[in-house]
Image (tube, rainbow, N blue to C red):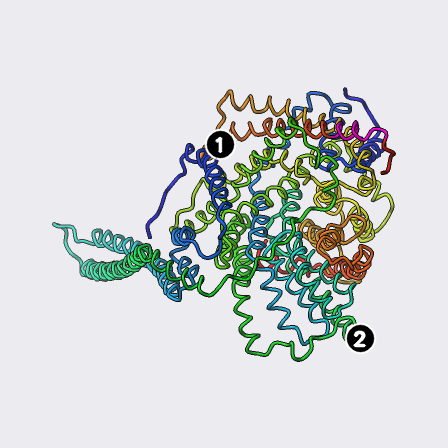
Amino acid sequence: MGLEIDIAWLTLLMFGSLAALLALGLPMAFCTGSLATIFLFVFGSPALLNMMPSRIFPFMTDYQLSAIPLFIFMAAVLEKAGIIEELFDAVYKWLGALKGGLASATVIACTLLAAMVGVVGATEVTMGMIALPAMLKRGYDQQLACGALLAGGTLGILIPPSVMAIVYAVVAQQSLGELLVGSIFPGMLLSGLYVGYITIRCYINPKLGPALPVKERADWREKLQLLKKTIAPILLILLVLGVIFFGVATPVEAAGIGTFGALFVAGLHRRLNWVNLQDAAIQTLKATSMVMWIFFGATMFVGFFIVKGGQEFVANSILGTGLPPYGILLLMMVVLFVLGMFIDWVGILLLTVPIFLPIMKGLEWSGLFGLPGVAPNDVALWYGVIFMVNMQMAFLSPPFGYSLFYLKSVAPPEISMGTIFRSAIHFMGLQWLGVGLCILFPQIVLWLPSLVYTR
Amino acid sequence: MPEINFVLPHWFYWGTLILFPLIAMAMVAREKKRTQRIGPSLFVAYLFWLTGGFIGLHRIYLRNVWALIFLPVVIAILYSNTVTRDHREDVSRLRSAYETAQSRLNRAKPIPGLEVTPGATARFAQAQANADKAKADYRKAEDTLHSSDWIATGLAILLGLMLVGDALLLPGLFKRVRAEELAAGPPAPELIPPEVVPQGTHEDPTAFVHTPLTNKLDAISTRVGEFVAYWAILSVFAYYYEVVGRYFLNSPTNWVHESMFLMFGMQYMLSGAYGYLSDQHVRVDVFYSQFSVRGKAIADIFTSIFFFIFVGTMLWTGYNFAADATRGNEMSFTEWGVQYWPVKLTLPIGAALLLLQGISKLIKDIIIVSRTRGVSHGS
């Protein structure tokens, strides 16, 4: 029909109607898709609707995107293989003598698992089933126990392999390998912050997380025997990360061989059978289908918004506030945090990155407090990793945080939703600290990729 | 090492995509009937023999220590391959040096009938010596190449013999291991986590409404979803083949990547309806979860207008898009050149499946609203 409308009103109309439809419970993928169709028809032309398949089709033939189902499949197979229980068992017997050792073991086991899986669900749920009862039985503080699980389990989507990195790489046209390598240190930084926080609090107040009684601690012989159980997981981590790190194969191929390794581990545990494979395949299909359909819908929605000049409008409005670059970045981080309270990360990424990233690229990043800044061609990588660290909070922030509900679904009944909400707050503080550190010291993100990928 | 220049035929690709899920479905059904599923399986042992036998995966799978002798052999093969490659380069370098020396010698040869100066004689002697030395170097390098080539071939034959031998030994080994594992008692019980449901889902009020018509529509979505889910298993072996082929057989393929991303592309499209049926498409449920069942159903009926606008448009434009491709029997512009139109055809098919699923959901929502008529809001 080709109606003309002021871009400010269009922005309000598009995002207002999106919010309304979302509140009415229509799934994200169909909200964005249908609104894009309607807006294309009303403010564009009916002929433009024929663009729809040609916008969707490139995603169906995108090489990088096939890493998403593969990494999700790998996680599903590993979950079936029983690797999670084994790993936690080994790590917690090693750390038993420490105050808060079980909680630290939870975070460390989650970190190791995060280096094998690229999603949050399986780790969070299975760890919740094993580690939470173990901690509560030994008199751990409920909030500390839940917090460690929430924060640790969420690392799965940050530490490579990570499905979020794949989606970002495709949306931002950024090298996937660089993103994966760049998120290694920030992931370890967060994990270290969690362990440090737990240990410090438990040493100040040992009642929060008492050490194991002496007779329950493992002796050295048992500890060495337990190491045997960690061989398979560690080899698998080295396989996937090593392949990506040394550029032996593309990340997609790394996902393929990683999954082959996962199948082998499942075989070693005698759990490789058709029924388990079917379960894993269907679980993968459901998760992938969700991500991909939001892809189809949201890219059309944002694509239309950008064509109508929405990106410039947002950029001008933000730049018009007169904030310095780092103030703008902080503003973006707050916007992402608030969105994370309501929408899941796929939606946030697809809706905001095409709008925010050009703004980021257009600014100069000269560093804060005399610290080194970021070169223009590193901005996309740097922002991507900061974005991923920020999205950790989206999993923890009520009312809509995946991890909160995953944990609630396996927690014993005496743990209320309120306890879980409160337990997330301290760890969200640590995540803000992590975001801040990555902004202040961009080398945390950029150093490792600069070693691997000379540009 | 032998090179394998296997290119997947198109008919085999499409055939596998159709047959493999059917076979897998049959296997799952057969396995579900069996009560006991623990212990190793001979099929899996042979599978690892075929795919990873060269590093002894089949023996590791059967917890056999002899698995460790495979790795040194493979490393020796890889090493001797690099050595052979170096030697081959030496040979070709020395051969060209020899040829150059030979042609210089020819030029330095005194021309019959012309008076020979002492300088020319010296030059000729020098060229003769050079040529002889180059020839000797070349012959020596060729001998080295032959012996290293012989070692590499020998190692490859050794590995081949080890694999063939193991193929024969595997059933016996398997029987022994299974007996041992059964004697050791049942394994620790499997920890089965509850199905992880993404938050913002499982609010669907229609999940428990059944009518004969909607059951049929739901069954279509489920069948298609299960069918395409099995494709993920194929991809694991395809990528594995690509990487192993590239590094161990020096034969990268031109079809693995394309065939796999096209397969996944079709999978995304065809799985939309199944995802919608199993309520996997996340929604923001801050308000929605507060509604009563009737309230949710009414909201669903209202928002279904938008759903149908999206899916209907996609069906219509997708049909045109695919029809263009089908008429021209479109192929991909790559070396492999696979048919493109079936991939494009999944666009309208996926939309149609989603449309059917939406109709099924709408019927259920209407049933809920009409059944709960008169019941107060918020119950």
Query: From what the image shows, is residue B190 above or below residue B224?
Result: below
Is B257 one of the magenta-colored residues? no
x, y percent for residue A208: 78, 71
- Residue A53 visible: yes
State whether discs 1 and 2 lie on one chain. no
**Res A81 quadrant in image:** bottom right
Query: From what the image shows, is residue B156 above or below residue B18?
Result: below
Query: From what the image shows, is residue A304 above or below residue A93?
Result: above
Overall secondary structure of the magenta section = helix
Label 1 environment density (alpha carbons within 10 Å; few <14, some 14–19, many ≥20):
few
- Disc 2 residue type (three-letter): Ile
Label 2 environment density (alpha carbons within 10 Å; few <14, some 14–19, many ≥20):
few
Chain on which label 1 sits:
B
x, y percent for residue A69: 58, 45
- Disc 1 residue type (three-letter): Phe
Secondary structure found at label 2:
helix
x, y percent for residue B224: 56, 34
How many badges with numbers are in the image?
A: 2
Residue at x-position 74% and y-position 64%: A145
- Tell me, for residue B83, which label it has, or none: none
Q: Which residues are magenta?
A: B365-374
- Tell me, for residue B333, which label it has, or none: 1
Give the mark toward the camera: 1 or 2: 2
Chain on which label 2 sits:
A
Q: Compare residues A275 and B133 and report the one nearer the observer.
A: A275
| Real-space CA distance between mark 1 and mark 2, rounded to the nearest whole angstrom | 66 Å
Q: Which residue is mark 2?
A: A204
- Residue B335 visible: no
Q: Quadrant of the N terminus of chain A?
A: top right
